[in-house]
Image (tube, rainbow, N blue to C red):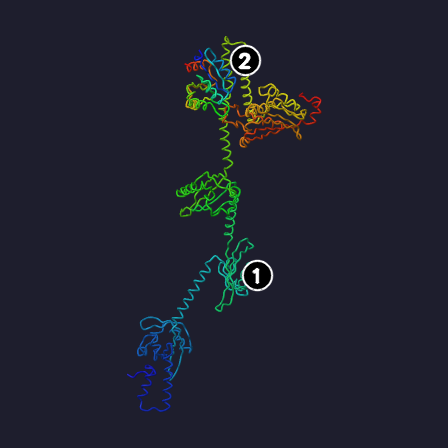
């Protein structure tokens, strides 16, 4: 069988030519041309098929056609075109044949194994030697389709992402014209994507004719840097606007991507949170207690400013320290041990009393309460609580205990003091019940004792009543009258002129006519107290000096002894109720009320009393009483002419 | 006859109480002596060797009744004297302390005259 000329390609042509005896030079040239065309045809990447139009059978195919359609050349030759070209394309082919047109369509070629090859195919009509041929040139577009598919997929994904977000995304060109906007952006103004395009954002969203001040988009285009700002729109919404410059492959800014997020709710929540924080902080920092937080190592992480008042520290000085750093050395170990024990057991605690050292060194008694706090996994993060200064309360408690102790001691003392006169009264009266062996003188003597001791008892009861009246807030019952200073001393005669100690007293009363408005009886009581104390607490025969003079608008009295004196601590407490400087020496009797009553009497007169004393040197008690108002003297007395009491 | 006289020393800072005791206890064959504080009481006890001492616990000066009792009981010269403590202190603790210091008897003020006389007579034998 004679092989077809095209079938074997250019090599075959050369072989065949070689087999011919002689060829005319013209034919030789023609054959060479043919060989060149054939070479070109076989080196083309496209599939090239030639078919007779009448039979639609393939009459020639190039090397690419054989390779890509996977048929040997001899199988292709004579094959009906429909075996390779699908029906739809055949219609085209026929149309091309009828109309003599040249058409390119996308189609598929059927391969030998039944597979298909996507192609771009060109049908054209050629006619030579009175025969019509169809030329089919097909190009494999598998790669192109795949690339297109990938691109489509990628475009779809991008669109999905950009359209799904709630953020408004707008791409502006450098002229601030909208190139593209996502659905959220379009919907925010109820416009379509298309309606947004090529317009300016300020005109659409703000009804302005120029960009807004400090527009981050304009700034990002100008600076080539990302920009952001918060903007409040006319409807009151708060927007976070971020703008990123978009650059091309050369790095030039081609526009800006603007992202707008509605943060109204977030801002509102932040503001509410801030408000709540502030409210909490205000409360924490206003209360008089000191509020704190420590971490699980016991170190302060928060300290309210109240610590300044409590311990003299600035909060920043204490943050990082532990509560034990603030305790005096002696309490530190115990405090820490207790805290670690509580922490181990995750226990809350309340009103734990502890001592802290103020920055200036003095000690402050503090009551601490706290609760542990945890993270969401229930790990203990630390404690939060309050510290309260209870120093004043502790002192008050101490004072109360002391007062209670003194009262108990007082009752015991009072009972004892009452027993002493009672001993004489009961003893002598019992003796007097059988007076047969007693002389009249003795009987009188014993009765005198009884009377004296009954008087002592009566005075004690009066003192008790006085103090009870003062205690209950009633004050002393005063009967004031105008009286000269002289008179107040004169009424001391039983003591200083007649009494057994009379030789010890010396008087130095100046301005003895000065007029005072006083309760004479009460002032006598004051002197009796002071003089009997002076006698009691000084050695026998040592002098006791009573003096008086006008100083300023007052009359100043003074009683001075050279007795045992008192320590400064005793002086401070000498006017306290139930206080007896010589409590250890119970032999010198007394209820411990005298000086307290004395001070009350002096103060009830508008005067003042004080004590100066030194152990071993003696004691001086001084008090002043205000001089009577001159008007009162005019109206109520004859002044100097009759200086005595009226 | 002189040896038969019983000497009673009263140690009390309150003159009216001393006088009361003197009246209650006076009698044939008794000699009463009075001291106004602890020091005086000790000194007199050492010079007159009393048979009985009526001792108040609360005394002015540097030594109280307990101390007087202790000192006199420690001193062989005066240890023989009976001590009757006579005080306004009524607590059991005071009583125990007084006996520990050497007291032979204890009576609280105010006291019954006959009771005191009976105790004194018993102590004097």
Q: Residue at x 55, y 65 (%)?
A: A175
| Image position, residue A506 (x, y; %) | 62, 24
* Protein chain holding label 2: A
Residue tagged 1: A211
Identify the disc placed on residue A380.
Answer: none
For residue A31, which quarter of the picture? bottom left
- On-image quarter of the C terminus of chain A: top right
Nearest to N terminus: mark 2 or mark 1? 1
| Image position, residue A469 (x, y; %) | 56, 24
A192 relative to A570, above or below: below
A515 relative to A102, above or below: above
Residue tagged 2: A445
| Image position, residue A93 (x, y; %) | 39, 75
A432 relative to A619, above or below: above
Which residue is at the front of the view, A17 or A577? A577
Mark 1 residue crowding within 10 angstroms, few (<14) / some (14–19) / many (20+): some
| Image position, residue A399 (x, y; %) | 51, 32
Mark 2–mark 1 CB contact (< 8 Å): no
Q: Is residue A579 visible?
A: no
Side of A173 where A96 appears, left or right: left
- On-image quarter of the N terminus of chain A: bottom left
Side of A552 where A388 appears, left or right: left
């Amino acid at each position: 069988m004679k092989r077809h000329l095209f079938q074997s390609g250019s090599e075959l042509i050369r072989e065949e030519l070689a087999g011919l005896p002689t060829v005319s030079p013209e034919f030789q040239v023609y054959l060479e041309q043919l060989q060149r065309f054939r070479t070109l045809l076989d080196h083309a990447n496209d599939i090239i098929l030639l078919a007779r139009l009448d039979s639609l059978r393939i009459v020639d195919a190039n090397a690419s056609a054989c390779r890509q359609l996977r048929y040997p050349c001899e199988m292709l030759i004579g094959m009906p075109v429909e075996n390779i070209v699908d029906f739809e394309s055949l219609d085209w082919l026929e149309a091309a044949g009828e109309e003599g047109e040249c058409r390119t369509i996308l189609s598929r070629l059927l391969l030998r194994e039944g597979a298909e090859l996507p192609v771009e195919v060109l049908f054209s009509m050629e006619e030579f030697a009175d025969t019509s041929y169809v030329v089919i040139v097909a190009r494999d577009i598998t790669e192109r389709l795949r690339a297109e598919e990938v691109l489509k997929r990628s475009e779809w994904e991008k669109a999905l992402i950009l359209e799904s977000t709630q953020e408004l995304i707008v791409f502006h060109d450098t002229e601030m014209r909208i190139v593209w906007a996502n659905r959220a952006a379009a919907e925010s103004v109820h416009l379509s994507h298309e309606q947004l395009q090529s317009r300016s954002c300020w005109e659409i969203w703000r009804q302005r004719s120029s960009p807004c001040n400090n527009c981050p988009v304009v700034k990002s285009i100008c600076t080539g840097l990302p920009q952001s700002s918060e903007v409040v729109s006319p409807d009151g919404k708060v927007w976070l606007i971020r703008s990123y410059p978009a650059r091309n492959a050369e790095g030039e800014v081609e526009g800006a991507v603007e992202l707008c997020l509605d943060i109204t709710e977030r801002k509102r929540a932040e503001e509410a949170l801030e408000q709540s924080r502030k409210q909490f902080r205000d409360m924490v920092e206003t209360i008089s207690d000191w509020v704190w937080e420590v971490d699980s190592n016991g170190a302060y992480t928060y300290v309210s400013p109240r610590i300044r008042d409590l311990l003299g520290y600035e909060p920043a000085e204490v943050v990082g320290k532990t509560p034990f750093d603030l305790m005096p050395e002696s309490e530190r170990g115990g405090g820490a041990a207790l805290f670690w024990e509580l922490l181990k057991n995750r226990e809350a605690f309340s009103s734990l009393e502890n001592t802290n050292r103020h920055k200036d060194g003095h000690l402050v008694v503090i009551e601490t309460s706290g609760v542990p706090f945890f993270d969401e996994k229930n790990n203990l993060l630390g404690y939060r609580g309050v510290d309260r200064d209870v120093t004043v309360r502790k002192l008050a408690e101490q004072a109360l205990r002391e007062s209670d102790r003194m009262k108990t001691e007082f009752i015991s003392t009072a009972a004892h003091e009452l027993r002493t006169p009672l001993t004489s009264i009961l003893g002598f009266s019992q003796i007097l019940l059988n007076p047969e062996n007693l002389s009249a003188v003795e009987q009188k003597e014993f009765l005198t004792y009884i009377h004296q001791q009954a008087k002592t008892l009566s005075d004690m009861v009066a003192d008790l009543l006085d103090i009870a009246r003062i205690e209950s807030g009633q004050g002393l019952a005063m009967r004031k009258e105008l009286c000269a200073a002289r008179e107040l001393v004169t009424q001391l005669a039983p003591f200083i002129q007649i009494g057994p100690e009379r030789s010890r007293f010396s008087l130095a009363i100046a301005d003895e006519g000065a007029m005072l408005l006083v309760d004479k009886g009460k002032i006598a009581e004051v002197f009796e107290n002071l003089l009997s104390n002076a006698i009691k607490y000084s050695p026998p025969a040592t002098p006791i000096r009573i003096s008086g003079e006008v100083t300023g608008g007052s009359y100043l009295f003074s009683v001075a002894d050279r007795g045992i004196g008192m320590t400064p601590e005793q002086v401070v407490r000498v006017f306290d109720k139930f206080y007896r400087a010589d409590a250890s020496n119970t032999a010198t009797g007394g209820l411990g009320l005298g000086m307290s009553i004395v001070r009350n009497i002096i103060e009830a007169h508008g005067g003042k009393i004080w004590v100066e004393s030194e152990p071993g040197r003696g004691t001086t008690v001084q008090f002043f009483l205000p001089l009577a108002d001159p008007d009162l003297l005019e109206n109520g007395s004859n002044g100097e002419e009759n200086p005595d009491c009226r | 006859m002189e040896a038969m006289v019983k000497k009673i020393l009263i140690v009390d800072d309150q003159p009216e109480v001393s006088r009361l005791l003197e009246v209650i206890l006076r009698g044939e064959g008794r000699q009463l002596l009075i001291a106004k504080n602890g020091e005086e009481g000790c000194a007199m006890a050492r010079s007159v060797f009393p048979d009985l001492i009526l001792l108040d616990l609360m005394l002015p000066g540097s030594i109280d009744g307990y101390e007087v009792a202790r000192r006199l009981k420690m001193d062989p010269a005066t240890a023989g004297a009976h001590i009757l403590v006579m005080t306004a202190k009524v607590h059991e603790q005071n009583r125990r302390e007084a006996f520990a210091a050497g007291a032979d008897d204890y009576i609280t003020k105010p006291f019954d005259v006959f009771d005191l006389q009976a105790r004194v007579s018993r102590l004097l034998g």
